[in-house]
Amino acid sequence: MNMPHTPVIESSGLVIGYKQKNNRKTVVHDSLQLRLFAGGLTGLLGPNGAGKSTLLRTVCGFQPALAGKVYLNDRLLSDYSQTALSRMIGVVLTEKTNVGGLTVNEIVSLGRQPYTGFFGVLKPEDKQVVNASLLAVGMMPLADRPVSELSDGERQKTMIAKALAQQCPVIVLDEPTAYLDVASRIEVMSLLRRLAVEQQKAILLSTHDLELAIQMCDCLWLLDSKHDMVSGAPEDLILDGTFATFINRDGISFDASTGKLTADRPTFPIAVEGDPDTVYWLCNALLRNGFRPSAENAAHGRIYCHSPRRMSFFLSGNIEHKASSIAEIIALANRHESVLKSPY
């Protein structure tokens, strides 16, 4: 994927927050320098209270900036009328809206309102856009079904189709996977990434799903209350230590080798090698049980994984213990814990 050099959305010295009734201002973040590109999926990560929703509302034009400038296609965001803005930015919120007895097709058709006006009479070209949007998210077979009868994943895809029907270059989503099961989360994120690439949309979403964001997003915006916002490709942020600085806190660490959060606990090295899939999941189990897998030789223990059902555990003195499951390996490690954790 070749990302264009000109951002669709860009900010300069952006300050976000709220104006109080007494004319005082509550600043949530200042000096934000944002760049959002077409053709890419950008994930906004941060703890609760970090200002993610405030930032999204400001970028969408729902909430004015306290200072600084936001540009949309090289034009000040504040210069757009609401109608013009609704043709530029499609928004999908977390909250489940009450849609009554409306069908999937009727909900997606509402995305044409910026073009049809208040009465919403669809012309043939509008219906073509609605059908294309339904096809793009895989909801055409359910077009006549009431939205109230959909699963959470199907409902989310319907709302994404509505945003597509607006034919906006930018789509902003606030925690689109918040209420979804694991499979639906992956499905929705994969859909968003495909739409960004195939339709050259600039898609920005907030999420708490760390591992999925690392896997699917082209760019991450890391936002918290203690540091300046940092952005970049997930892999670059991991390898230069930025991600660990952003994530780590008392009792929790980010493991750059796996891309996962781990609970801090005393760990003791065990050398692990062999079949890659078996090694990966054995390492997961060892970490959970207080052992640190290592590619280098460890003083008191070494495990070779021939296959998921054939593993050899060598203790000090090269004594081999055979195992046919990861559970057996963990049992052996715990049984010989005093040897493995010995400093001598």
Image (cartoon, helix red, strand yellow):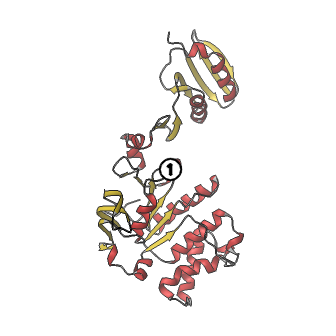
Image-quadrant location for residue 99: bottom right
Which sits in the foreground, 151 or 94? Answer: 94
- Locate residue 234 relative to residue 151 in the image: left or right: left
Q: Position of residue 210 (x, y in %)?
A: 51, 48
Image-quadrant location for residue 78: bottom left
For disc 1, the neighbor class at 10 Å (few under 14, some 14 to 19, many from 20) is some
Which sits in the foreground, 161 or 264? Answer: 264
Examine the rendered structure and indicate whether residue 308 appears above or below residue 141. above
Q: Position of residue 247 (x, y in %)?
A: 44, 42
> Which kind of residue does numbered mark 1 sit on?
Gln
Examine the rendered structure and indicate whether residue 197 appears above or below residue 144. above
Q: Secondary structure at mark 1?
A: helix
Q: Position of residue 206 (x, y in %)?
A: 48, 58
Residue that mark 1 sits on: 215
* Residue name at image x 62 percent, y 19 percent: 313
Which sits in the foreground, 328 or 107? Answer: 107
Q: Position of residue 96 (x, y in %)?
A: 61, 67
Report the residue that reaches farthest toward the front.
22
How many numbered circles does the render carry? 1
Examine the rendered structure and indicate whether residue 163 appears above or below residue 327. below
Q: Quadrant of the N terminus?
A: bottom left
Whether residue 7 is visible here, answered yes or no, is no
* Residue name at image x 69 percent, y 28 percent: 327
Whether residue 290 is visible here, answered yes or no, is yes
